[in-house]
Image: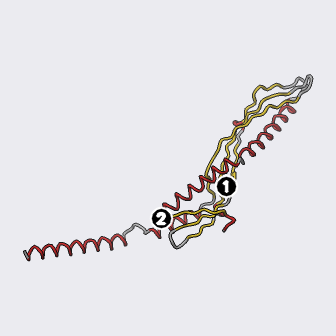
Amino acid sequence: MKKRIYVLILSLLALLVSVVLLLVWWNTSGTPRWEVQQRILMERFEKMQNLQVLSSHLLTHERFRNPAFFNANEFVLIARAKAVYGLDLSQVKLSRSQDNQITVYLPPVKVQELVMNAKDVEFVGVKKGLLTSQQSFETFQQQAVTNLHAQLAQQARDPQLLADATTQARDYFETLFEAAGFEKVNFKDRDAF
């Protein structure tokens, strides 16, 4: 009976020593701790310049007509564009609290780019007036394209699209900082910093 108790005690001591050695090895192994991982993640985040959070495809059309008796010019112009929304990350400010929370002060999401290529513009039902020169007709078409580009730029600043882009930005930051080990991510307006 005494022999069994000694064997049991020695087994428990061996198990305890093994657990202690495992914990020592775990803390000194090649896997960085949360604090180190957070620091590395924050350094990489700070090196980023811009964050593109959403892109939207826009479409507009308009009928252009310059009426004249023998010189009527007419066509329908259809234009597509891609609006890219994002943040200037140099304007994002971060504030960490002691209870493992982070507050992200976001600037407003803006249209970073509006892309409209020549292949994205279609002229439909083109009718050139009999007395109109080709050069003046092409000038008329170019002015129409410029007008539609302005319409697409206005369409890109739609409050609903900007709100969707802001939601995407917040989701991105929330995922990023929760993966870095922060328990709670709060958002405030950049002006509140």
Considering only order in the chain, which callout, 1 or 2, is on the residue closer to the N terminus?
Answer: 1
Snapshot quadrant of residue 154: top right
Residue 144 sits in quarter: top right
Left or right of 69: which side holds 88? left
Q: Around disc 1, counting alpha carbons within 10 Å, would you say few (fewer than 14), some (14 to 19), or many (20 or more)? A: many
Question: Is 72 situated left or right of 6 in this image?
Answer: right
- Residue at 24% x, 74% y is 16
Q: Which residue lies furthest to the left in this view?
A: 1
Residue that badge 1 annotates: 109
In the structure shown, which secondary structural element does the residue marked by tag 1 occupy?
loop
Q: Name the residue under label 2.
A: 181
Residue type highlighted by circle 1: Val
Q: Where is residue 56 shown, x and y percent of the image?
A: 65, 44
Q: Position of residue 193 (x, y in %)?
A: 66, 68
Judging depth in this view, the residue of 31 and 13 nearest the camera is: 13
- Toward the right, the furthest residue is 69
Q: Disc 2 marks which amino acid?
A: Gly
From the viewer's side, name the closer residue of 129 and 13.
13
Chosen colour scheme: secondary structure
Q: Position of residue 50 (x, y in %)?
A: 63, 57
Q: Establish if 191 lies above or below 153.
A: below
- Secondary structure beneath label 2: loop
